[in-house]
Image (spheres, rainbow, N blue to C red):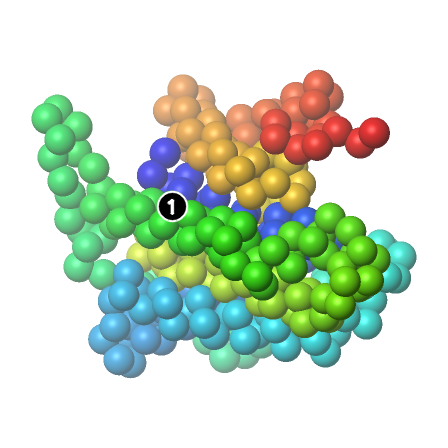
Amino acid sequence: MLFGGVFSLMAVGLTLIFGVMRVVNFAHGDMMVWGMYLAWLMATRGGVDPYAGFVVCAAALFLLGFVVQRVLVQRIVDAPHEMQILLMLGVALVLENAALLAFGPEPQRVRSALAQSTLWLGPVFVDVARLIAFGVAVVLTLLLSLFLFRTDLGRSIRAAADNTYGALVIGTDVRRVYAVAFGVGAACVGAAGALVAPLLPFQPPTGLQLSVASFNIVIIGGMGSLLGAFMGGLLVAVAESLGAVFLKPSLKELVSFSLLVLILLFRPAGLFGRRAS
């Protein structure tokens, strides 16, 4: 359940990008890997704990997402989906190979004093690092929700997601809104990368696995739904944990993908997605 909070934050960024621009970001997992490596650099070179430096990782990934959207994605927003897929796959390959050149193929892990601490709650002990990651992920998701529903820019993002032509008619700078939305989605995954870096080893090819997990979560929760992404992350994390206990750890993903198949069969729009009229 605690690890699911980070899964949720990762999926929230992906579903925000899709909900606003209808562009599936296949580079999402590779952006998260770069968030992990930024946290690793700050920890090894500057002694900054990742649970304090996640803000820097989020800001850096916001800039990356903003630039990628302005320079590349904006050109294919109205293009056929196959062109969008090819472009984002190309971005994913560039990010993965850039990480491979910069950091090498060896697995890394960020060291944090909190990663070895536990909190006893009666007969149950809780991993402090996972508890903090969960708490930060929940707070960031709530802040994102407040941003989207209580600020003028957030309302503009929602308006562009709901009716792009209508947003243009009332004078909304849709290109700016798209860039900010893509940047915020990348910032979410950058923060998630920093939070999970002390918990899991990572290397450049890890991005593909993270992208697949993100798609699994947002499809289960409902593409374009923030609540669905958050609840889907918790559900997938719990399902995989139960699979590891009752089956074996190597088969834990079998449970989450079986859940995905059931959702696609009986509720294709996802648990919280809107059915097409």
Tell me if I can see residue 88 in this picture: yes
**Could you tell me which residue is drawn at 61 percent across and 27 percent down?**
271
Locate the N terminus by quadrant: top left
Residue 126: x percent and y percent? 20, 37
The image quadrant of residue 160 is bottom right
Residue 130: x percent and y percent? 29, 45
Question: Where does label 1 land, which residue?
Answer: 138
**Could you tell me which residue is drawn at 36 percent across and 65 percent down?**
54
Residue 8: x percent and y percent? 48, 44
- Label 1 packing within 10 angstroms: few (<14), some (14-19), many (20+): some
Q: Is residue 31 above or below residue 66?
A: above
Tell me the kind of residue under disc 1.
Answer: Val
Instruction: Find numbered disc 1 in the image and state the secondary structure of the residue it sits on.
Output: helix
Task: Decide if residue 141 is on the left or right side of residue 19.
Answer: left
Residue found at the far right of this picture: 80
Q: Nearer the viewer, residue 235 or 102?
A: 235
Q: How many marks?
A: 1
Locate the C terminus by quadrant: top right
**Could you tell me which residue is drawn at 52 percent across and 59 percent down?**
151
Task: Decide if residue 261 is on the left or right side of residue 79.
Answer: left
Q: Nearer the viewer, residue 205 or 110?
A: 110
Residue 135: x percent and y percent? 31, 46
The image quadrant of residue 36 is bottom left
**Could you tell me which residue is drawn at 57 percent across and 61 percent down?**
152
Q: Is residue 217 above or below residue 47?
A: above
Q: Nearer the viewer, residue 104 or 36?
A: 36
Q: Nearer the viewer, residue 120 or 274?
A: 274
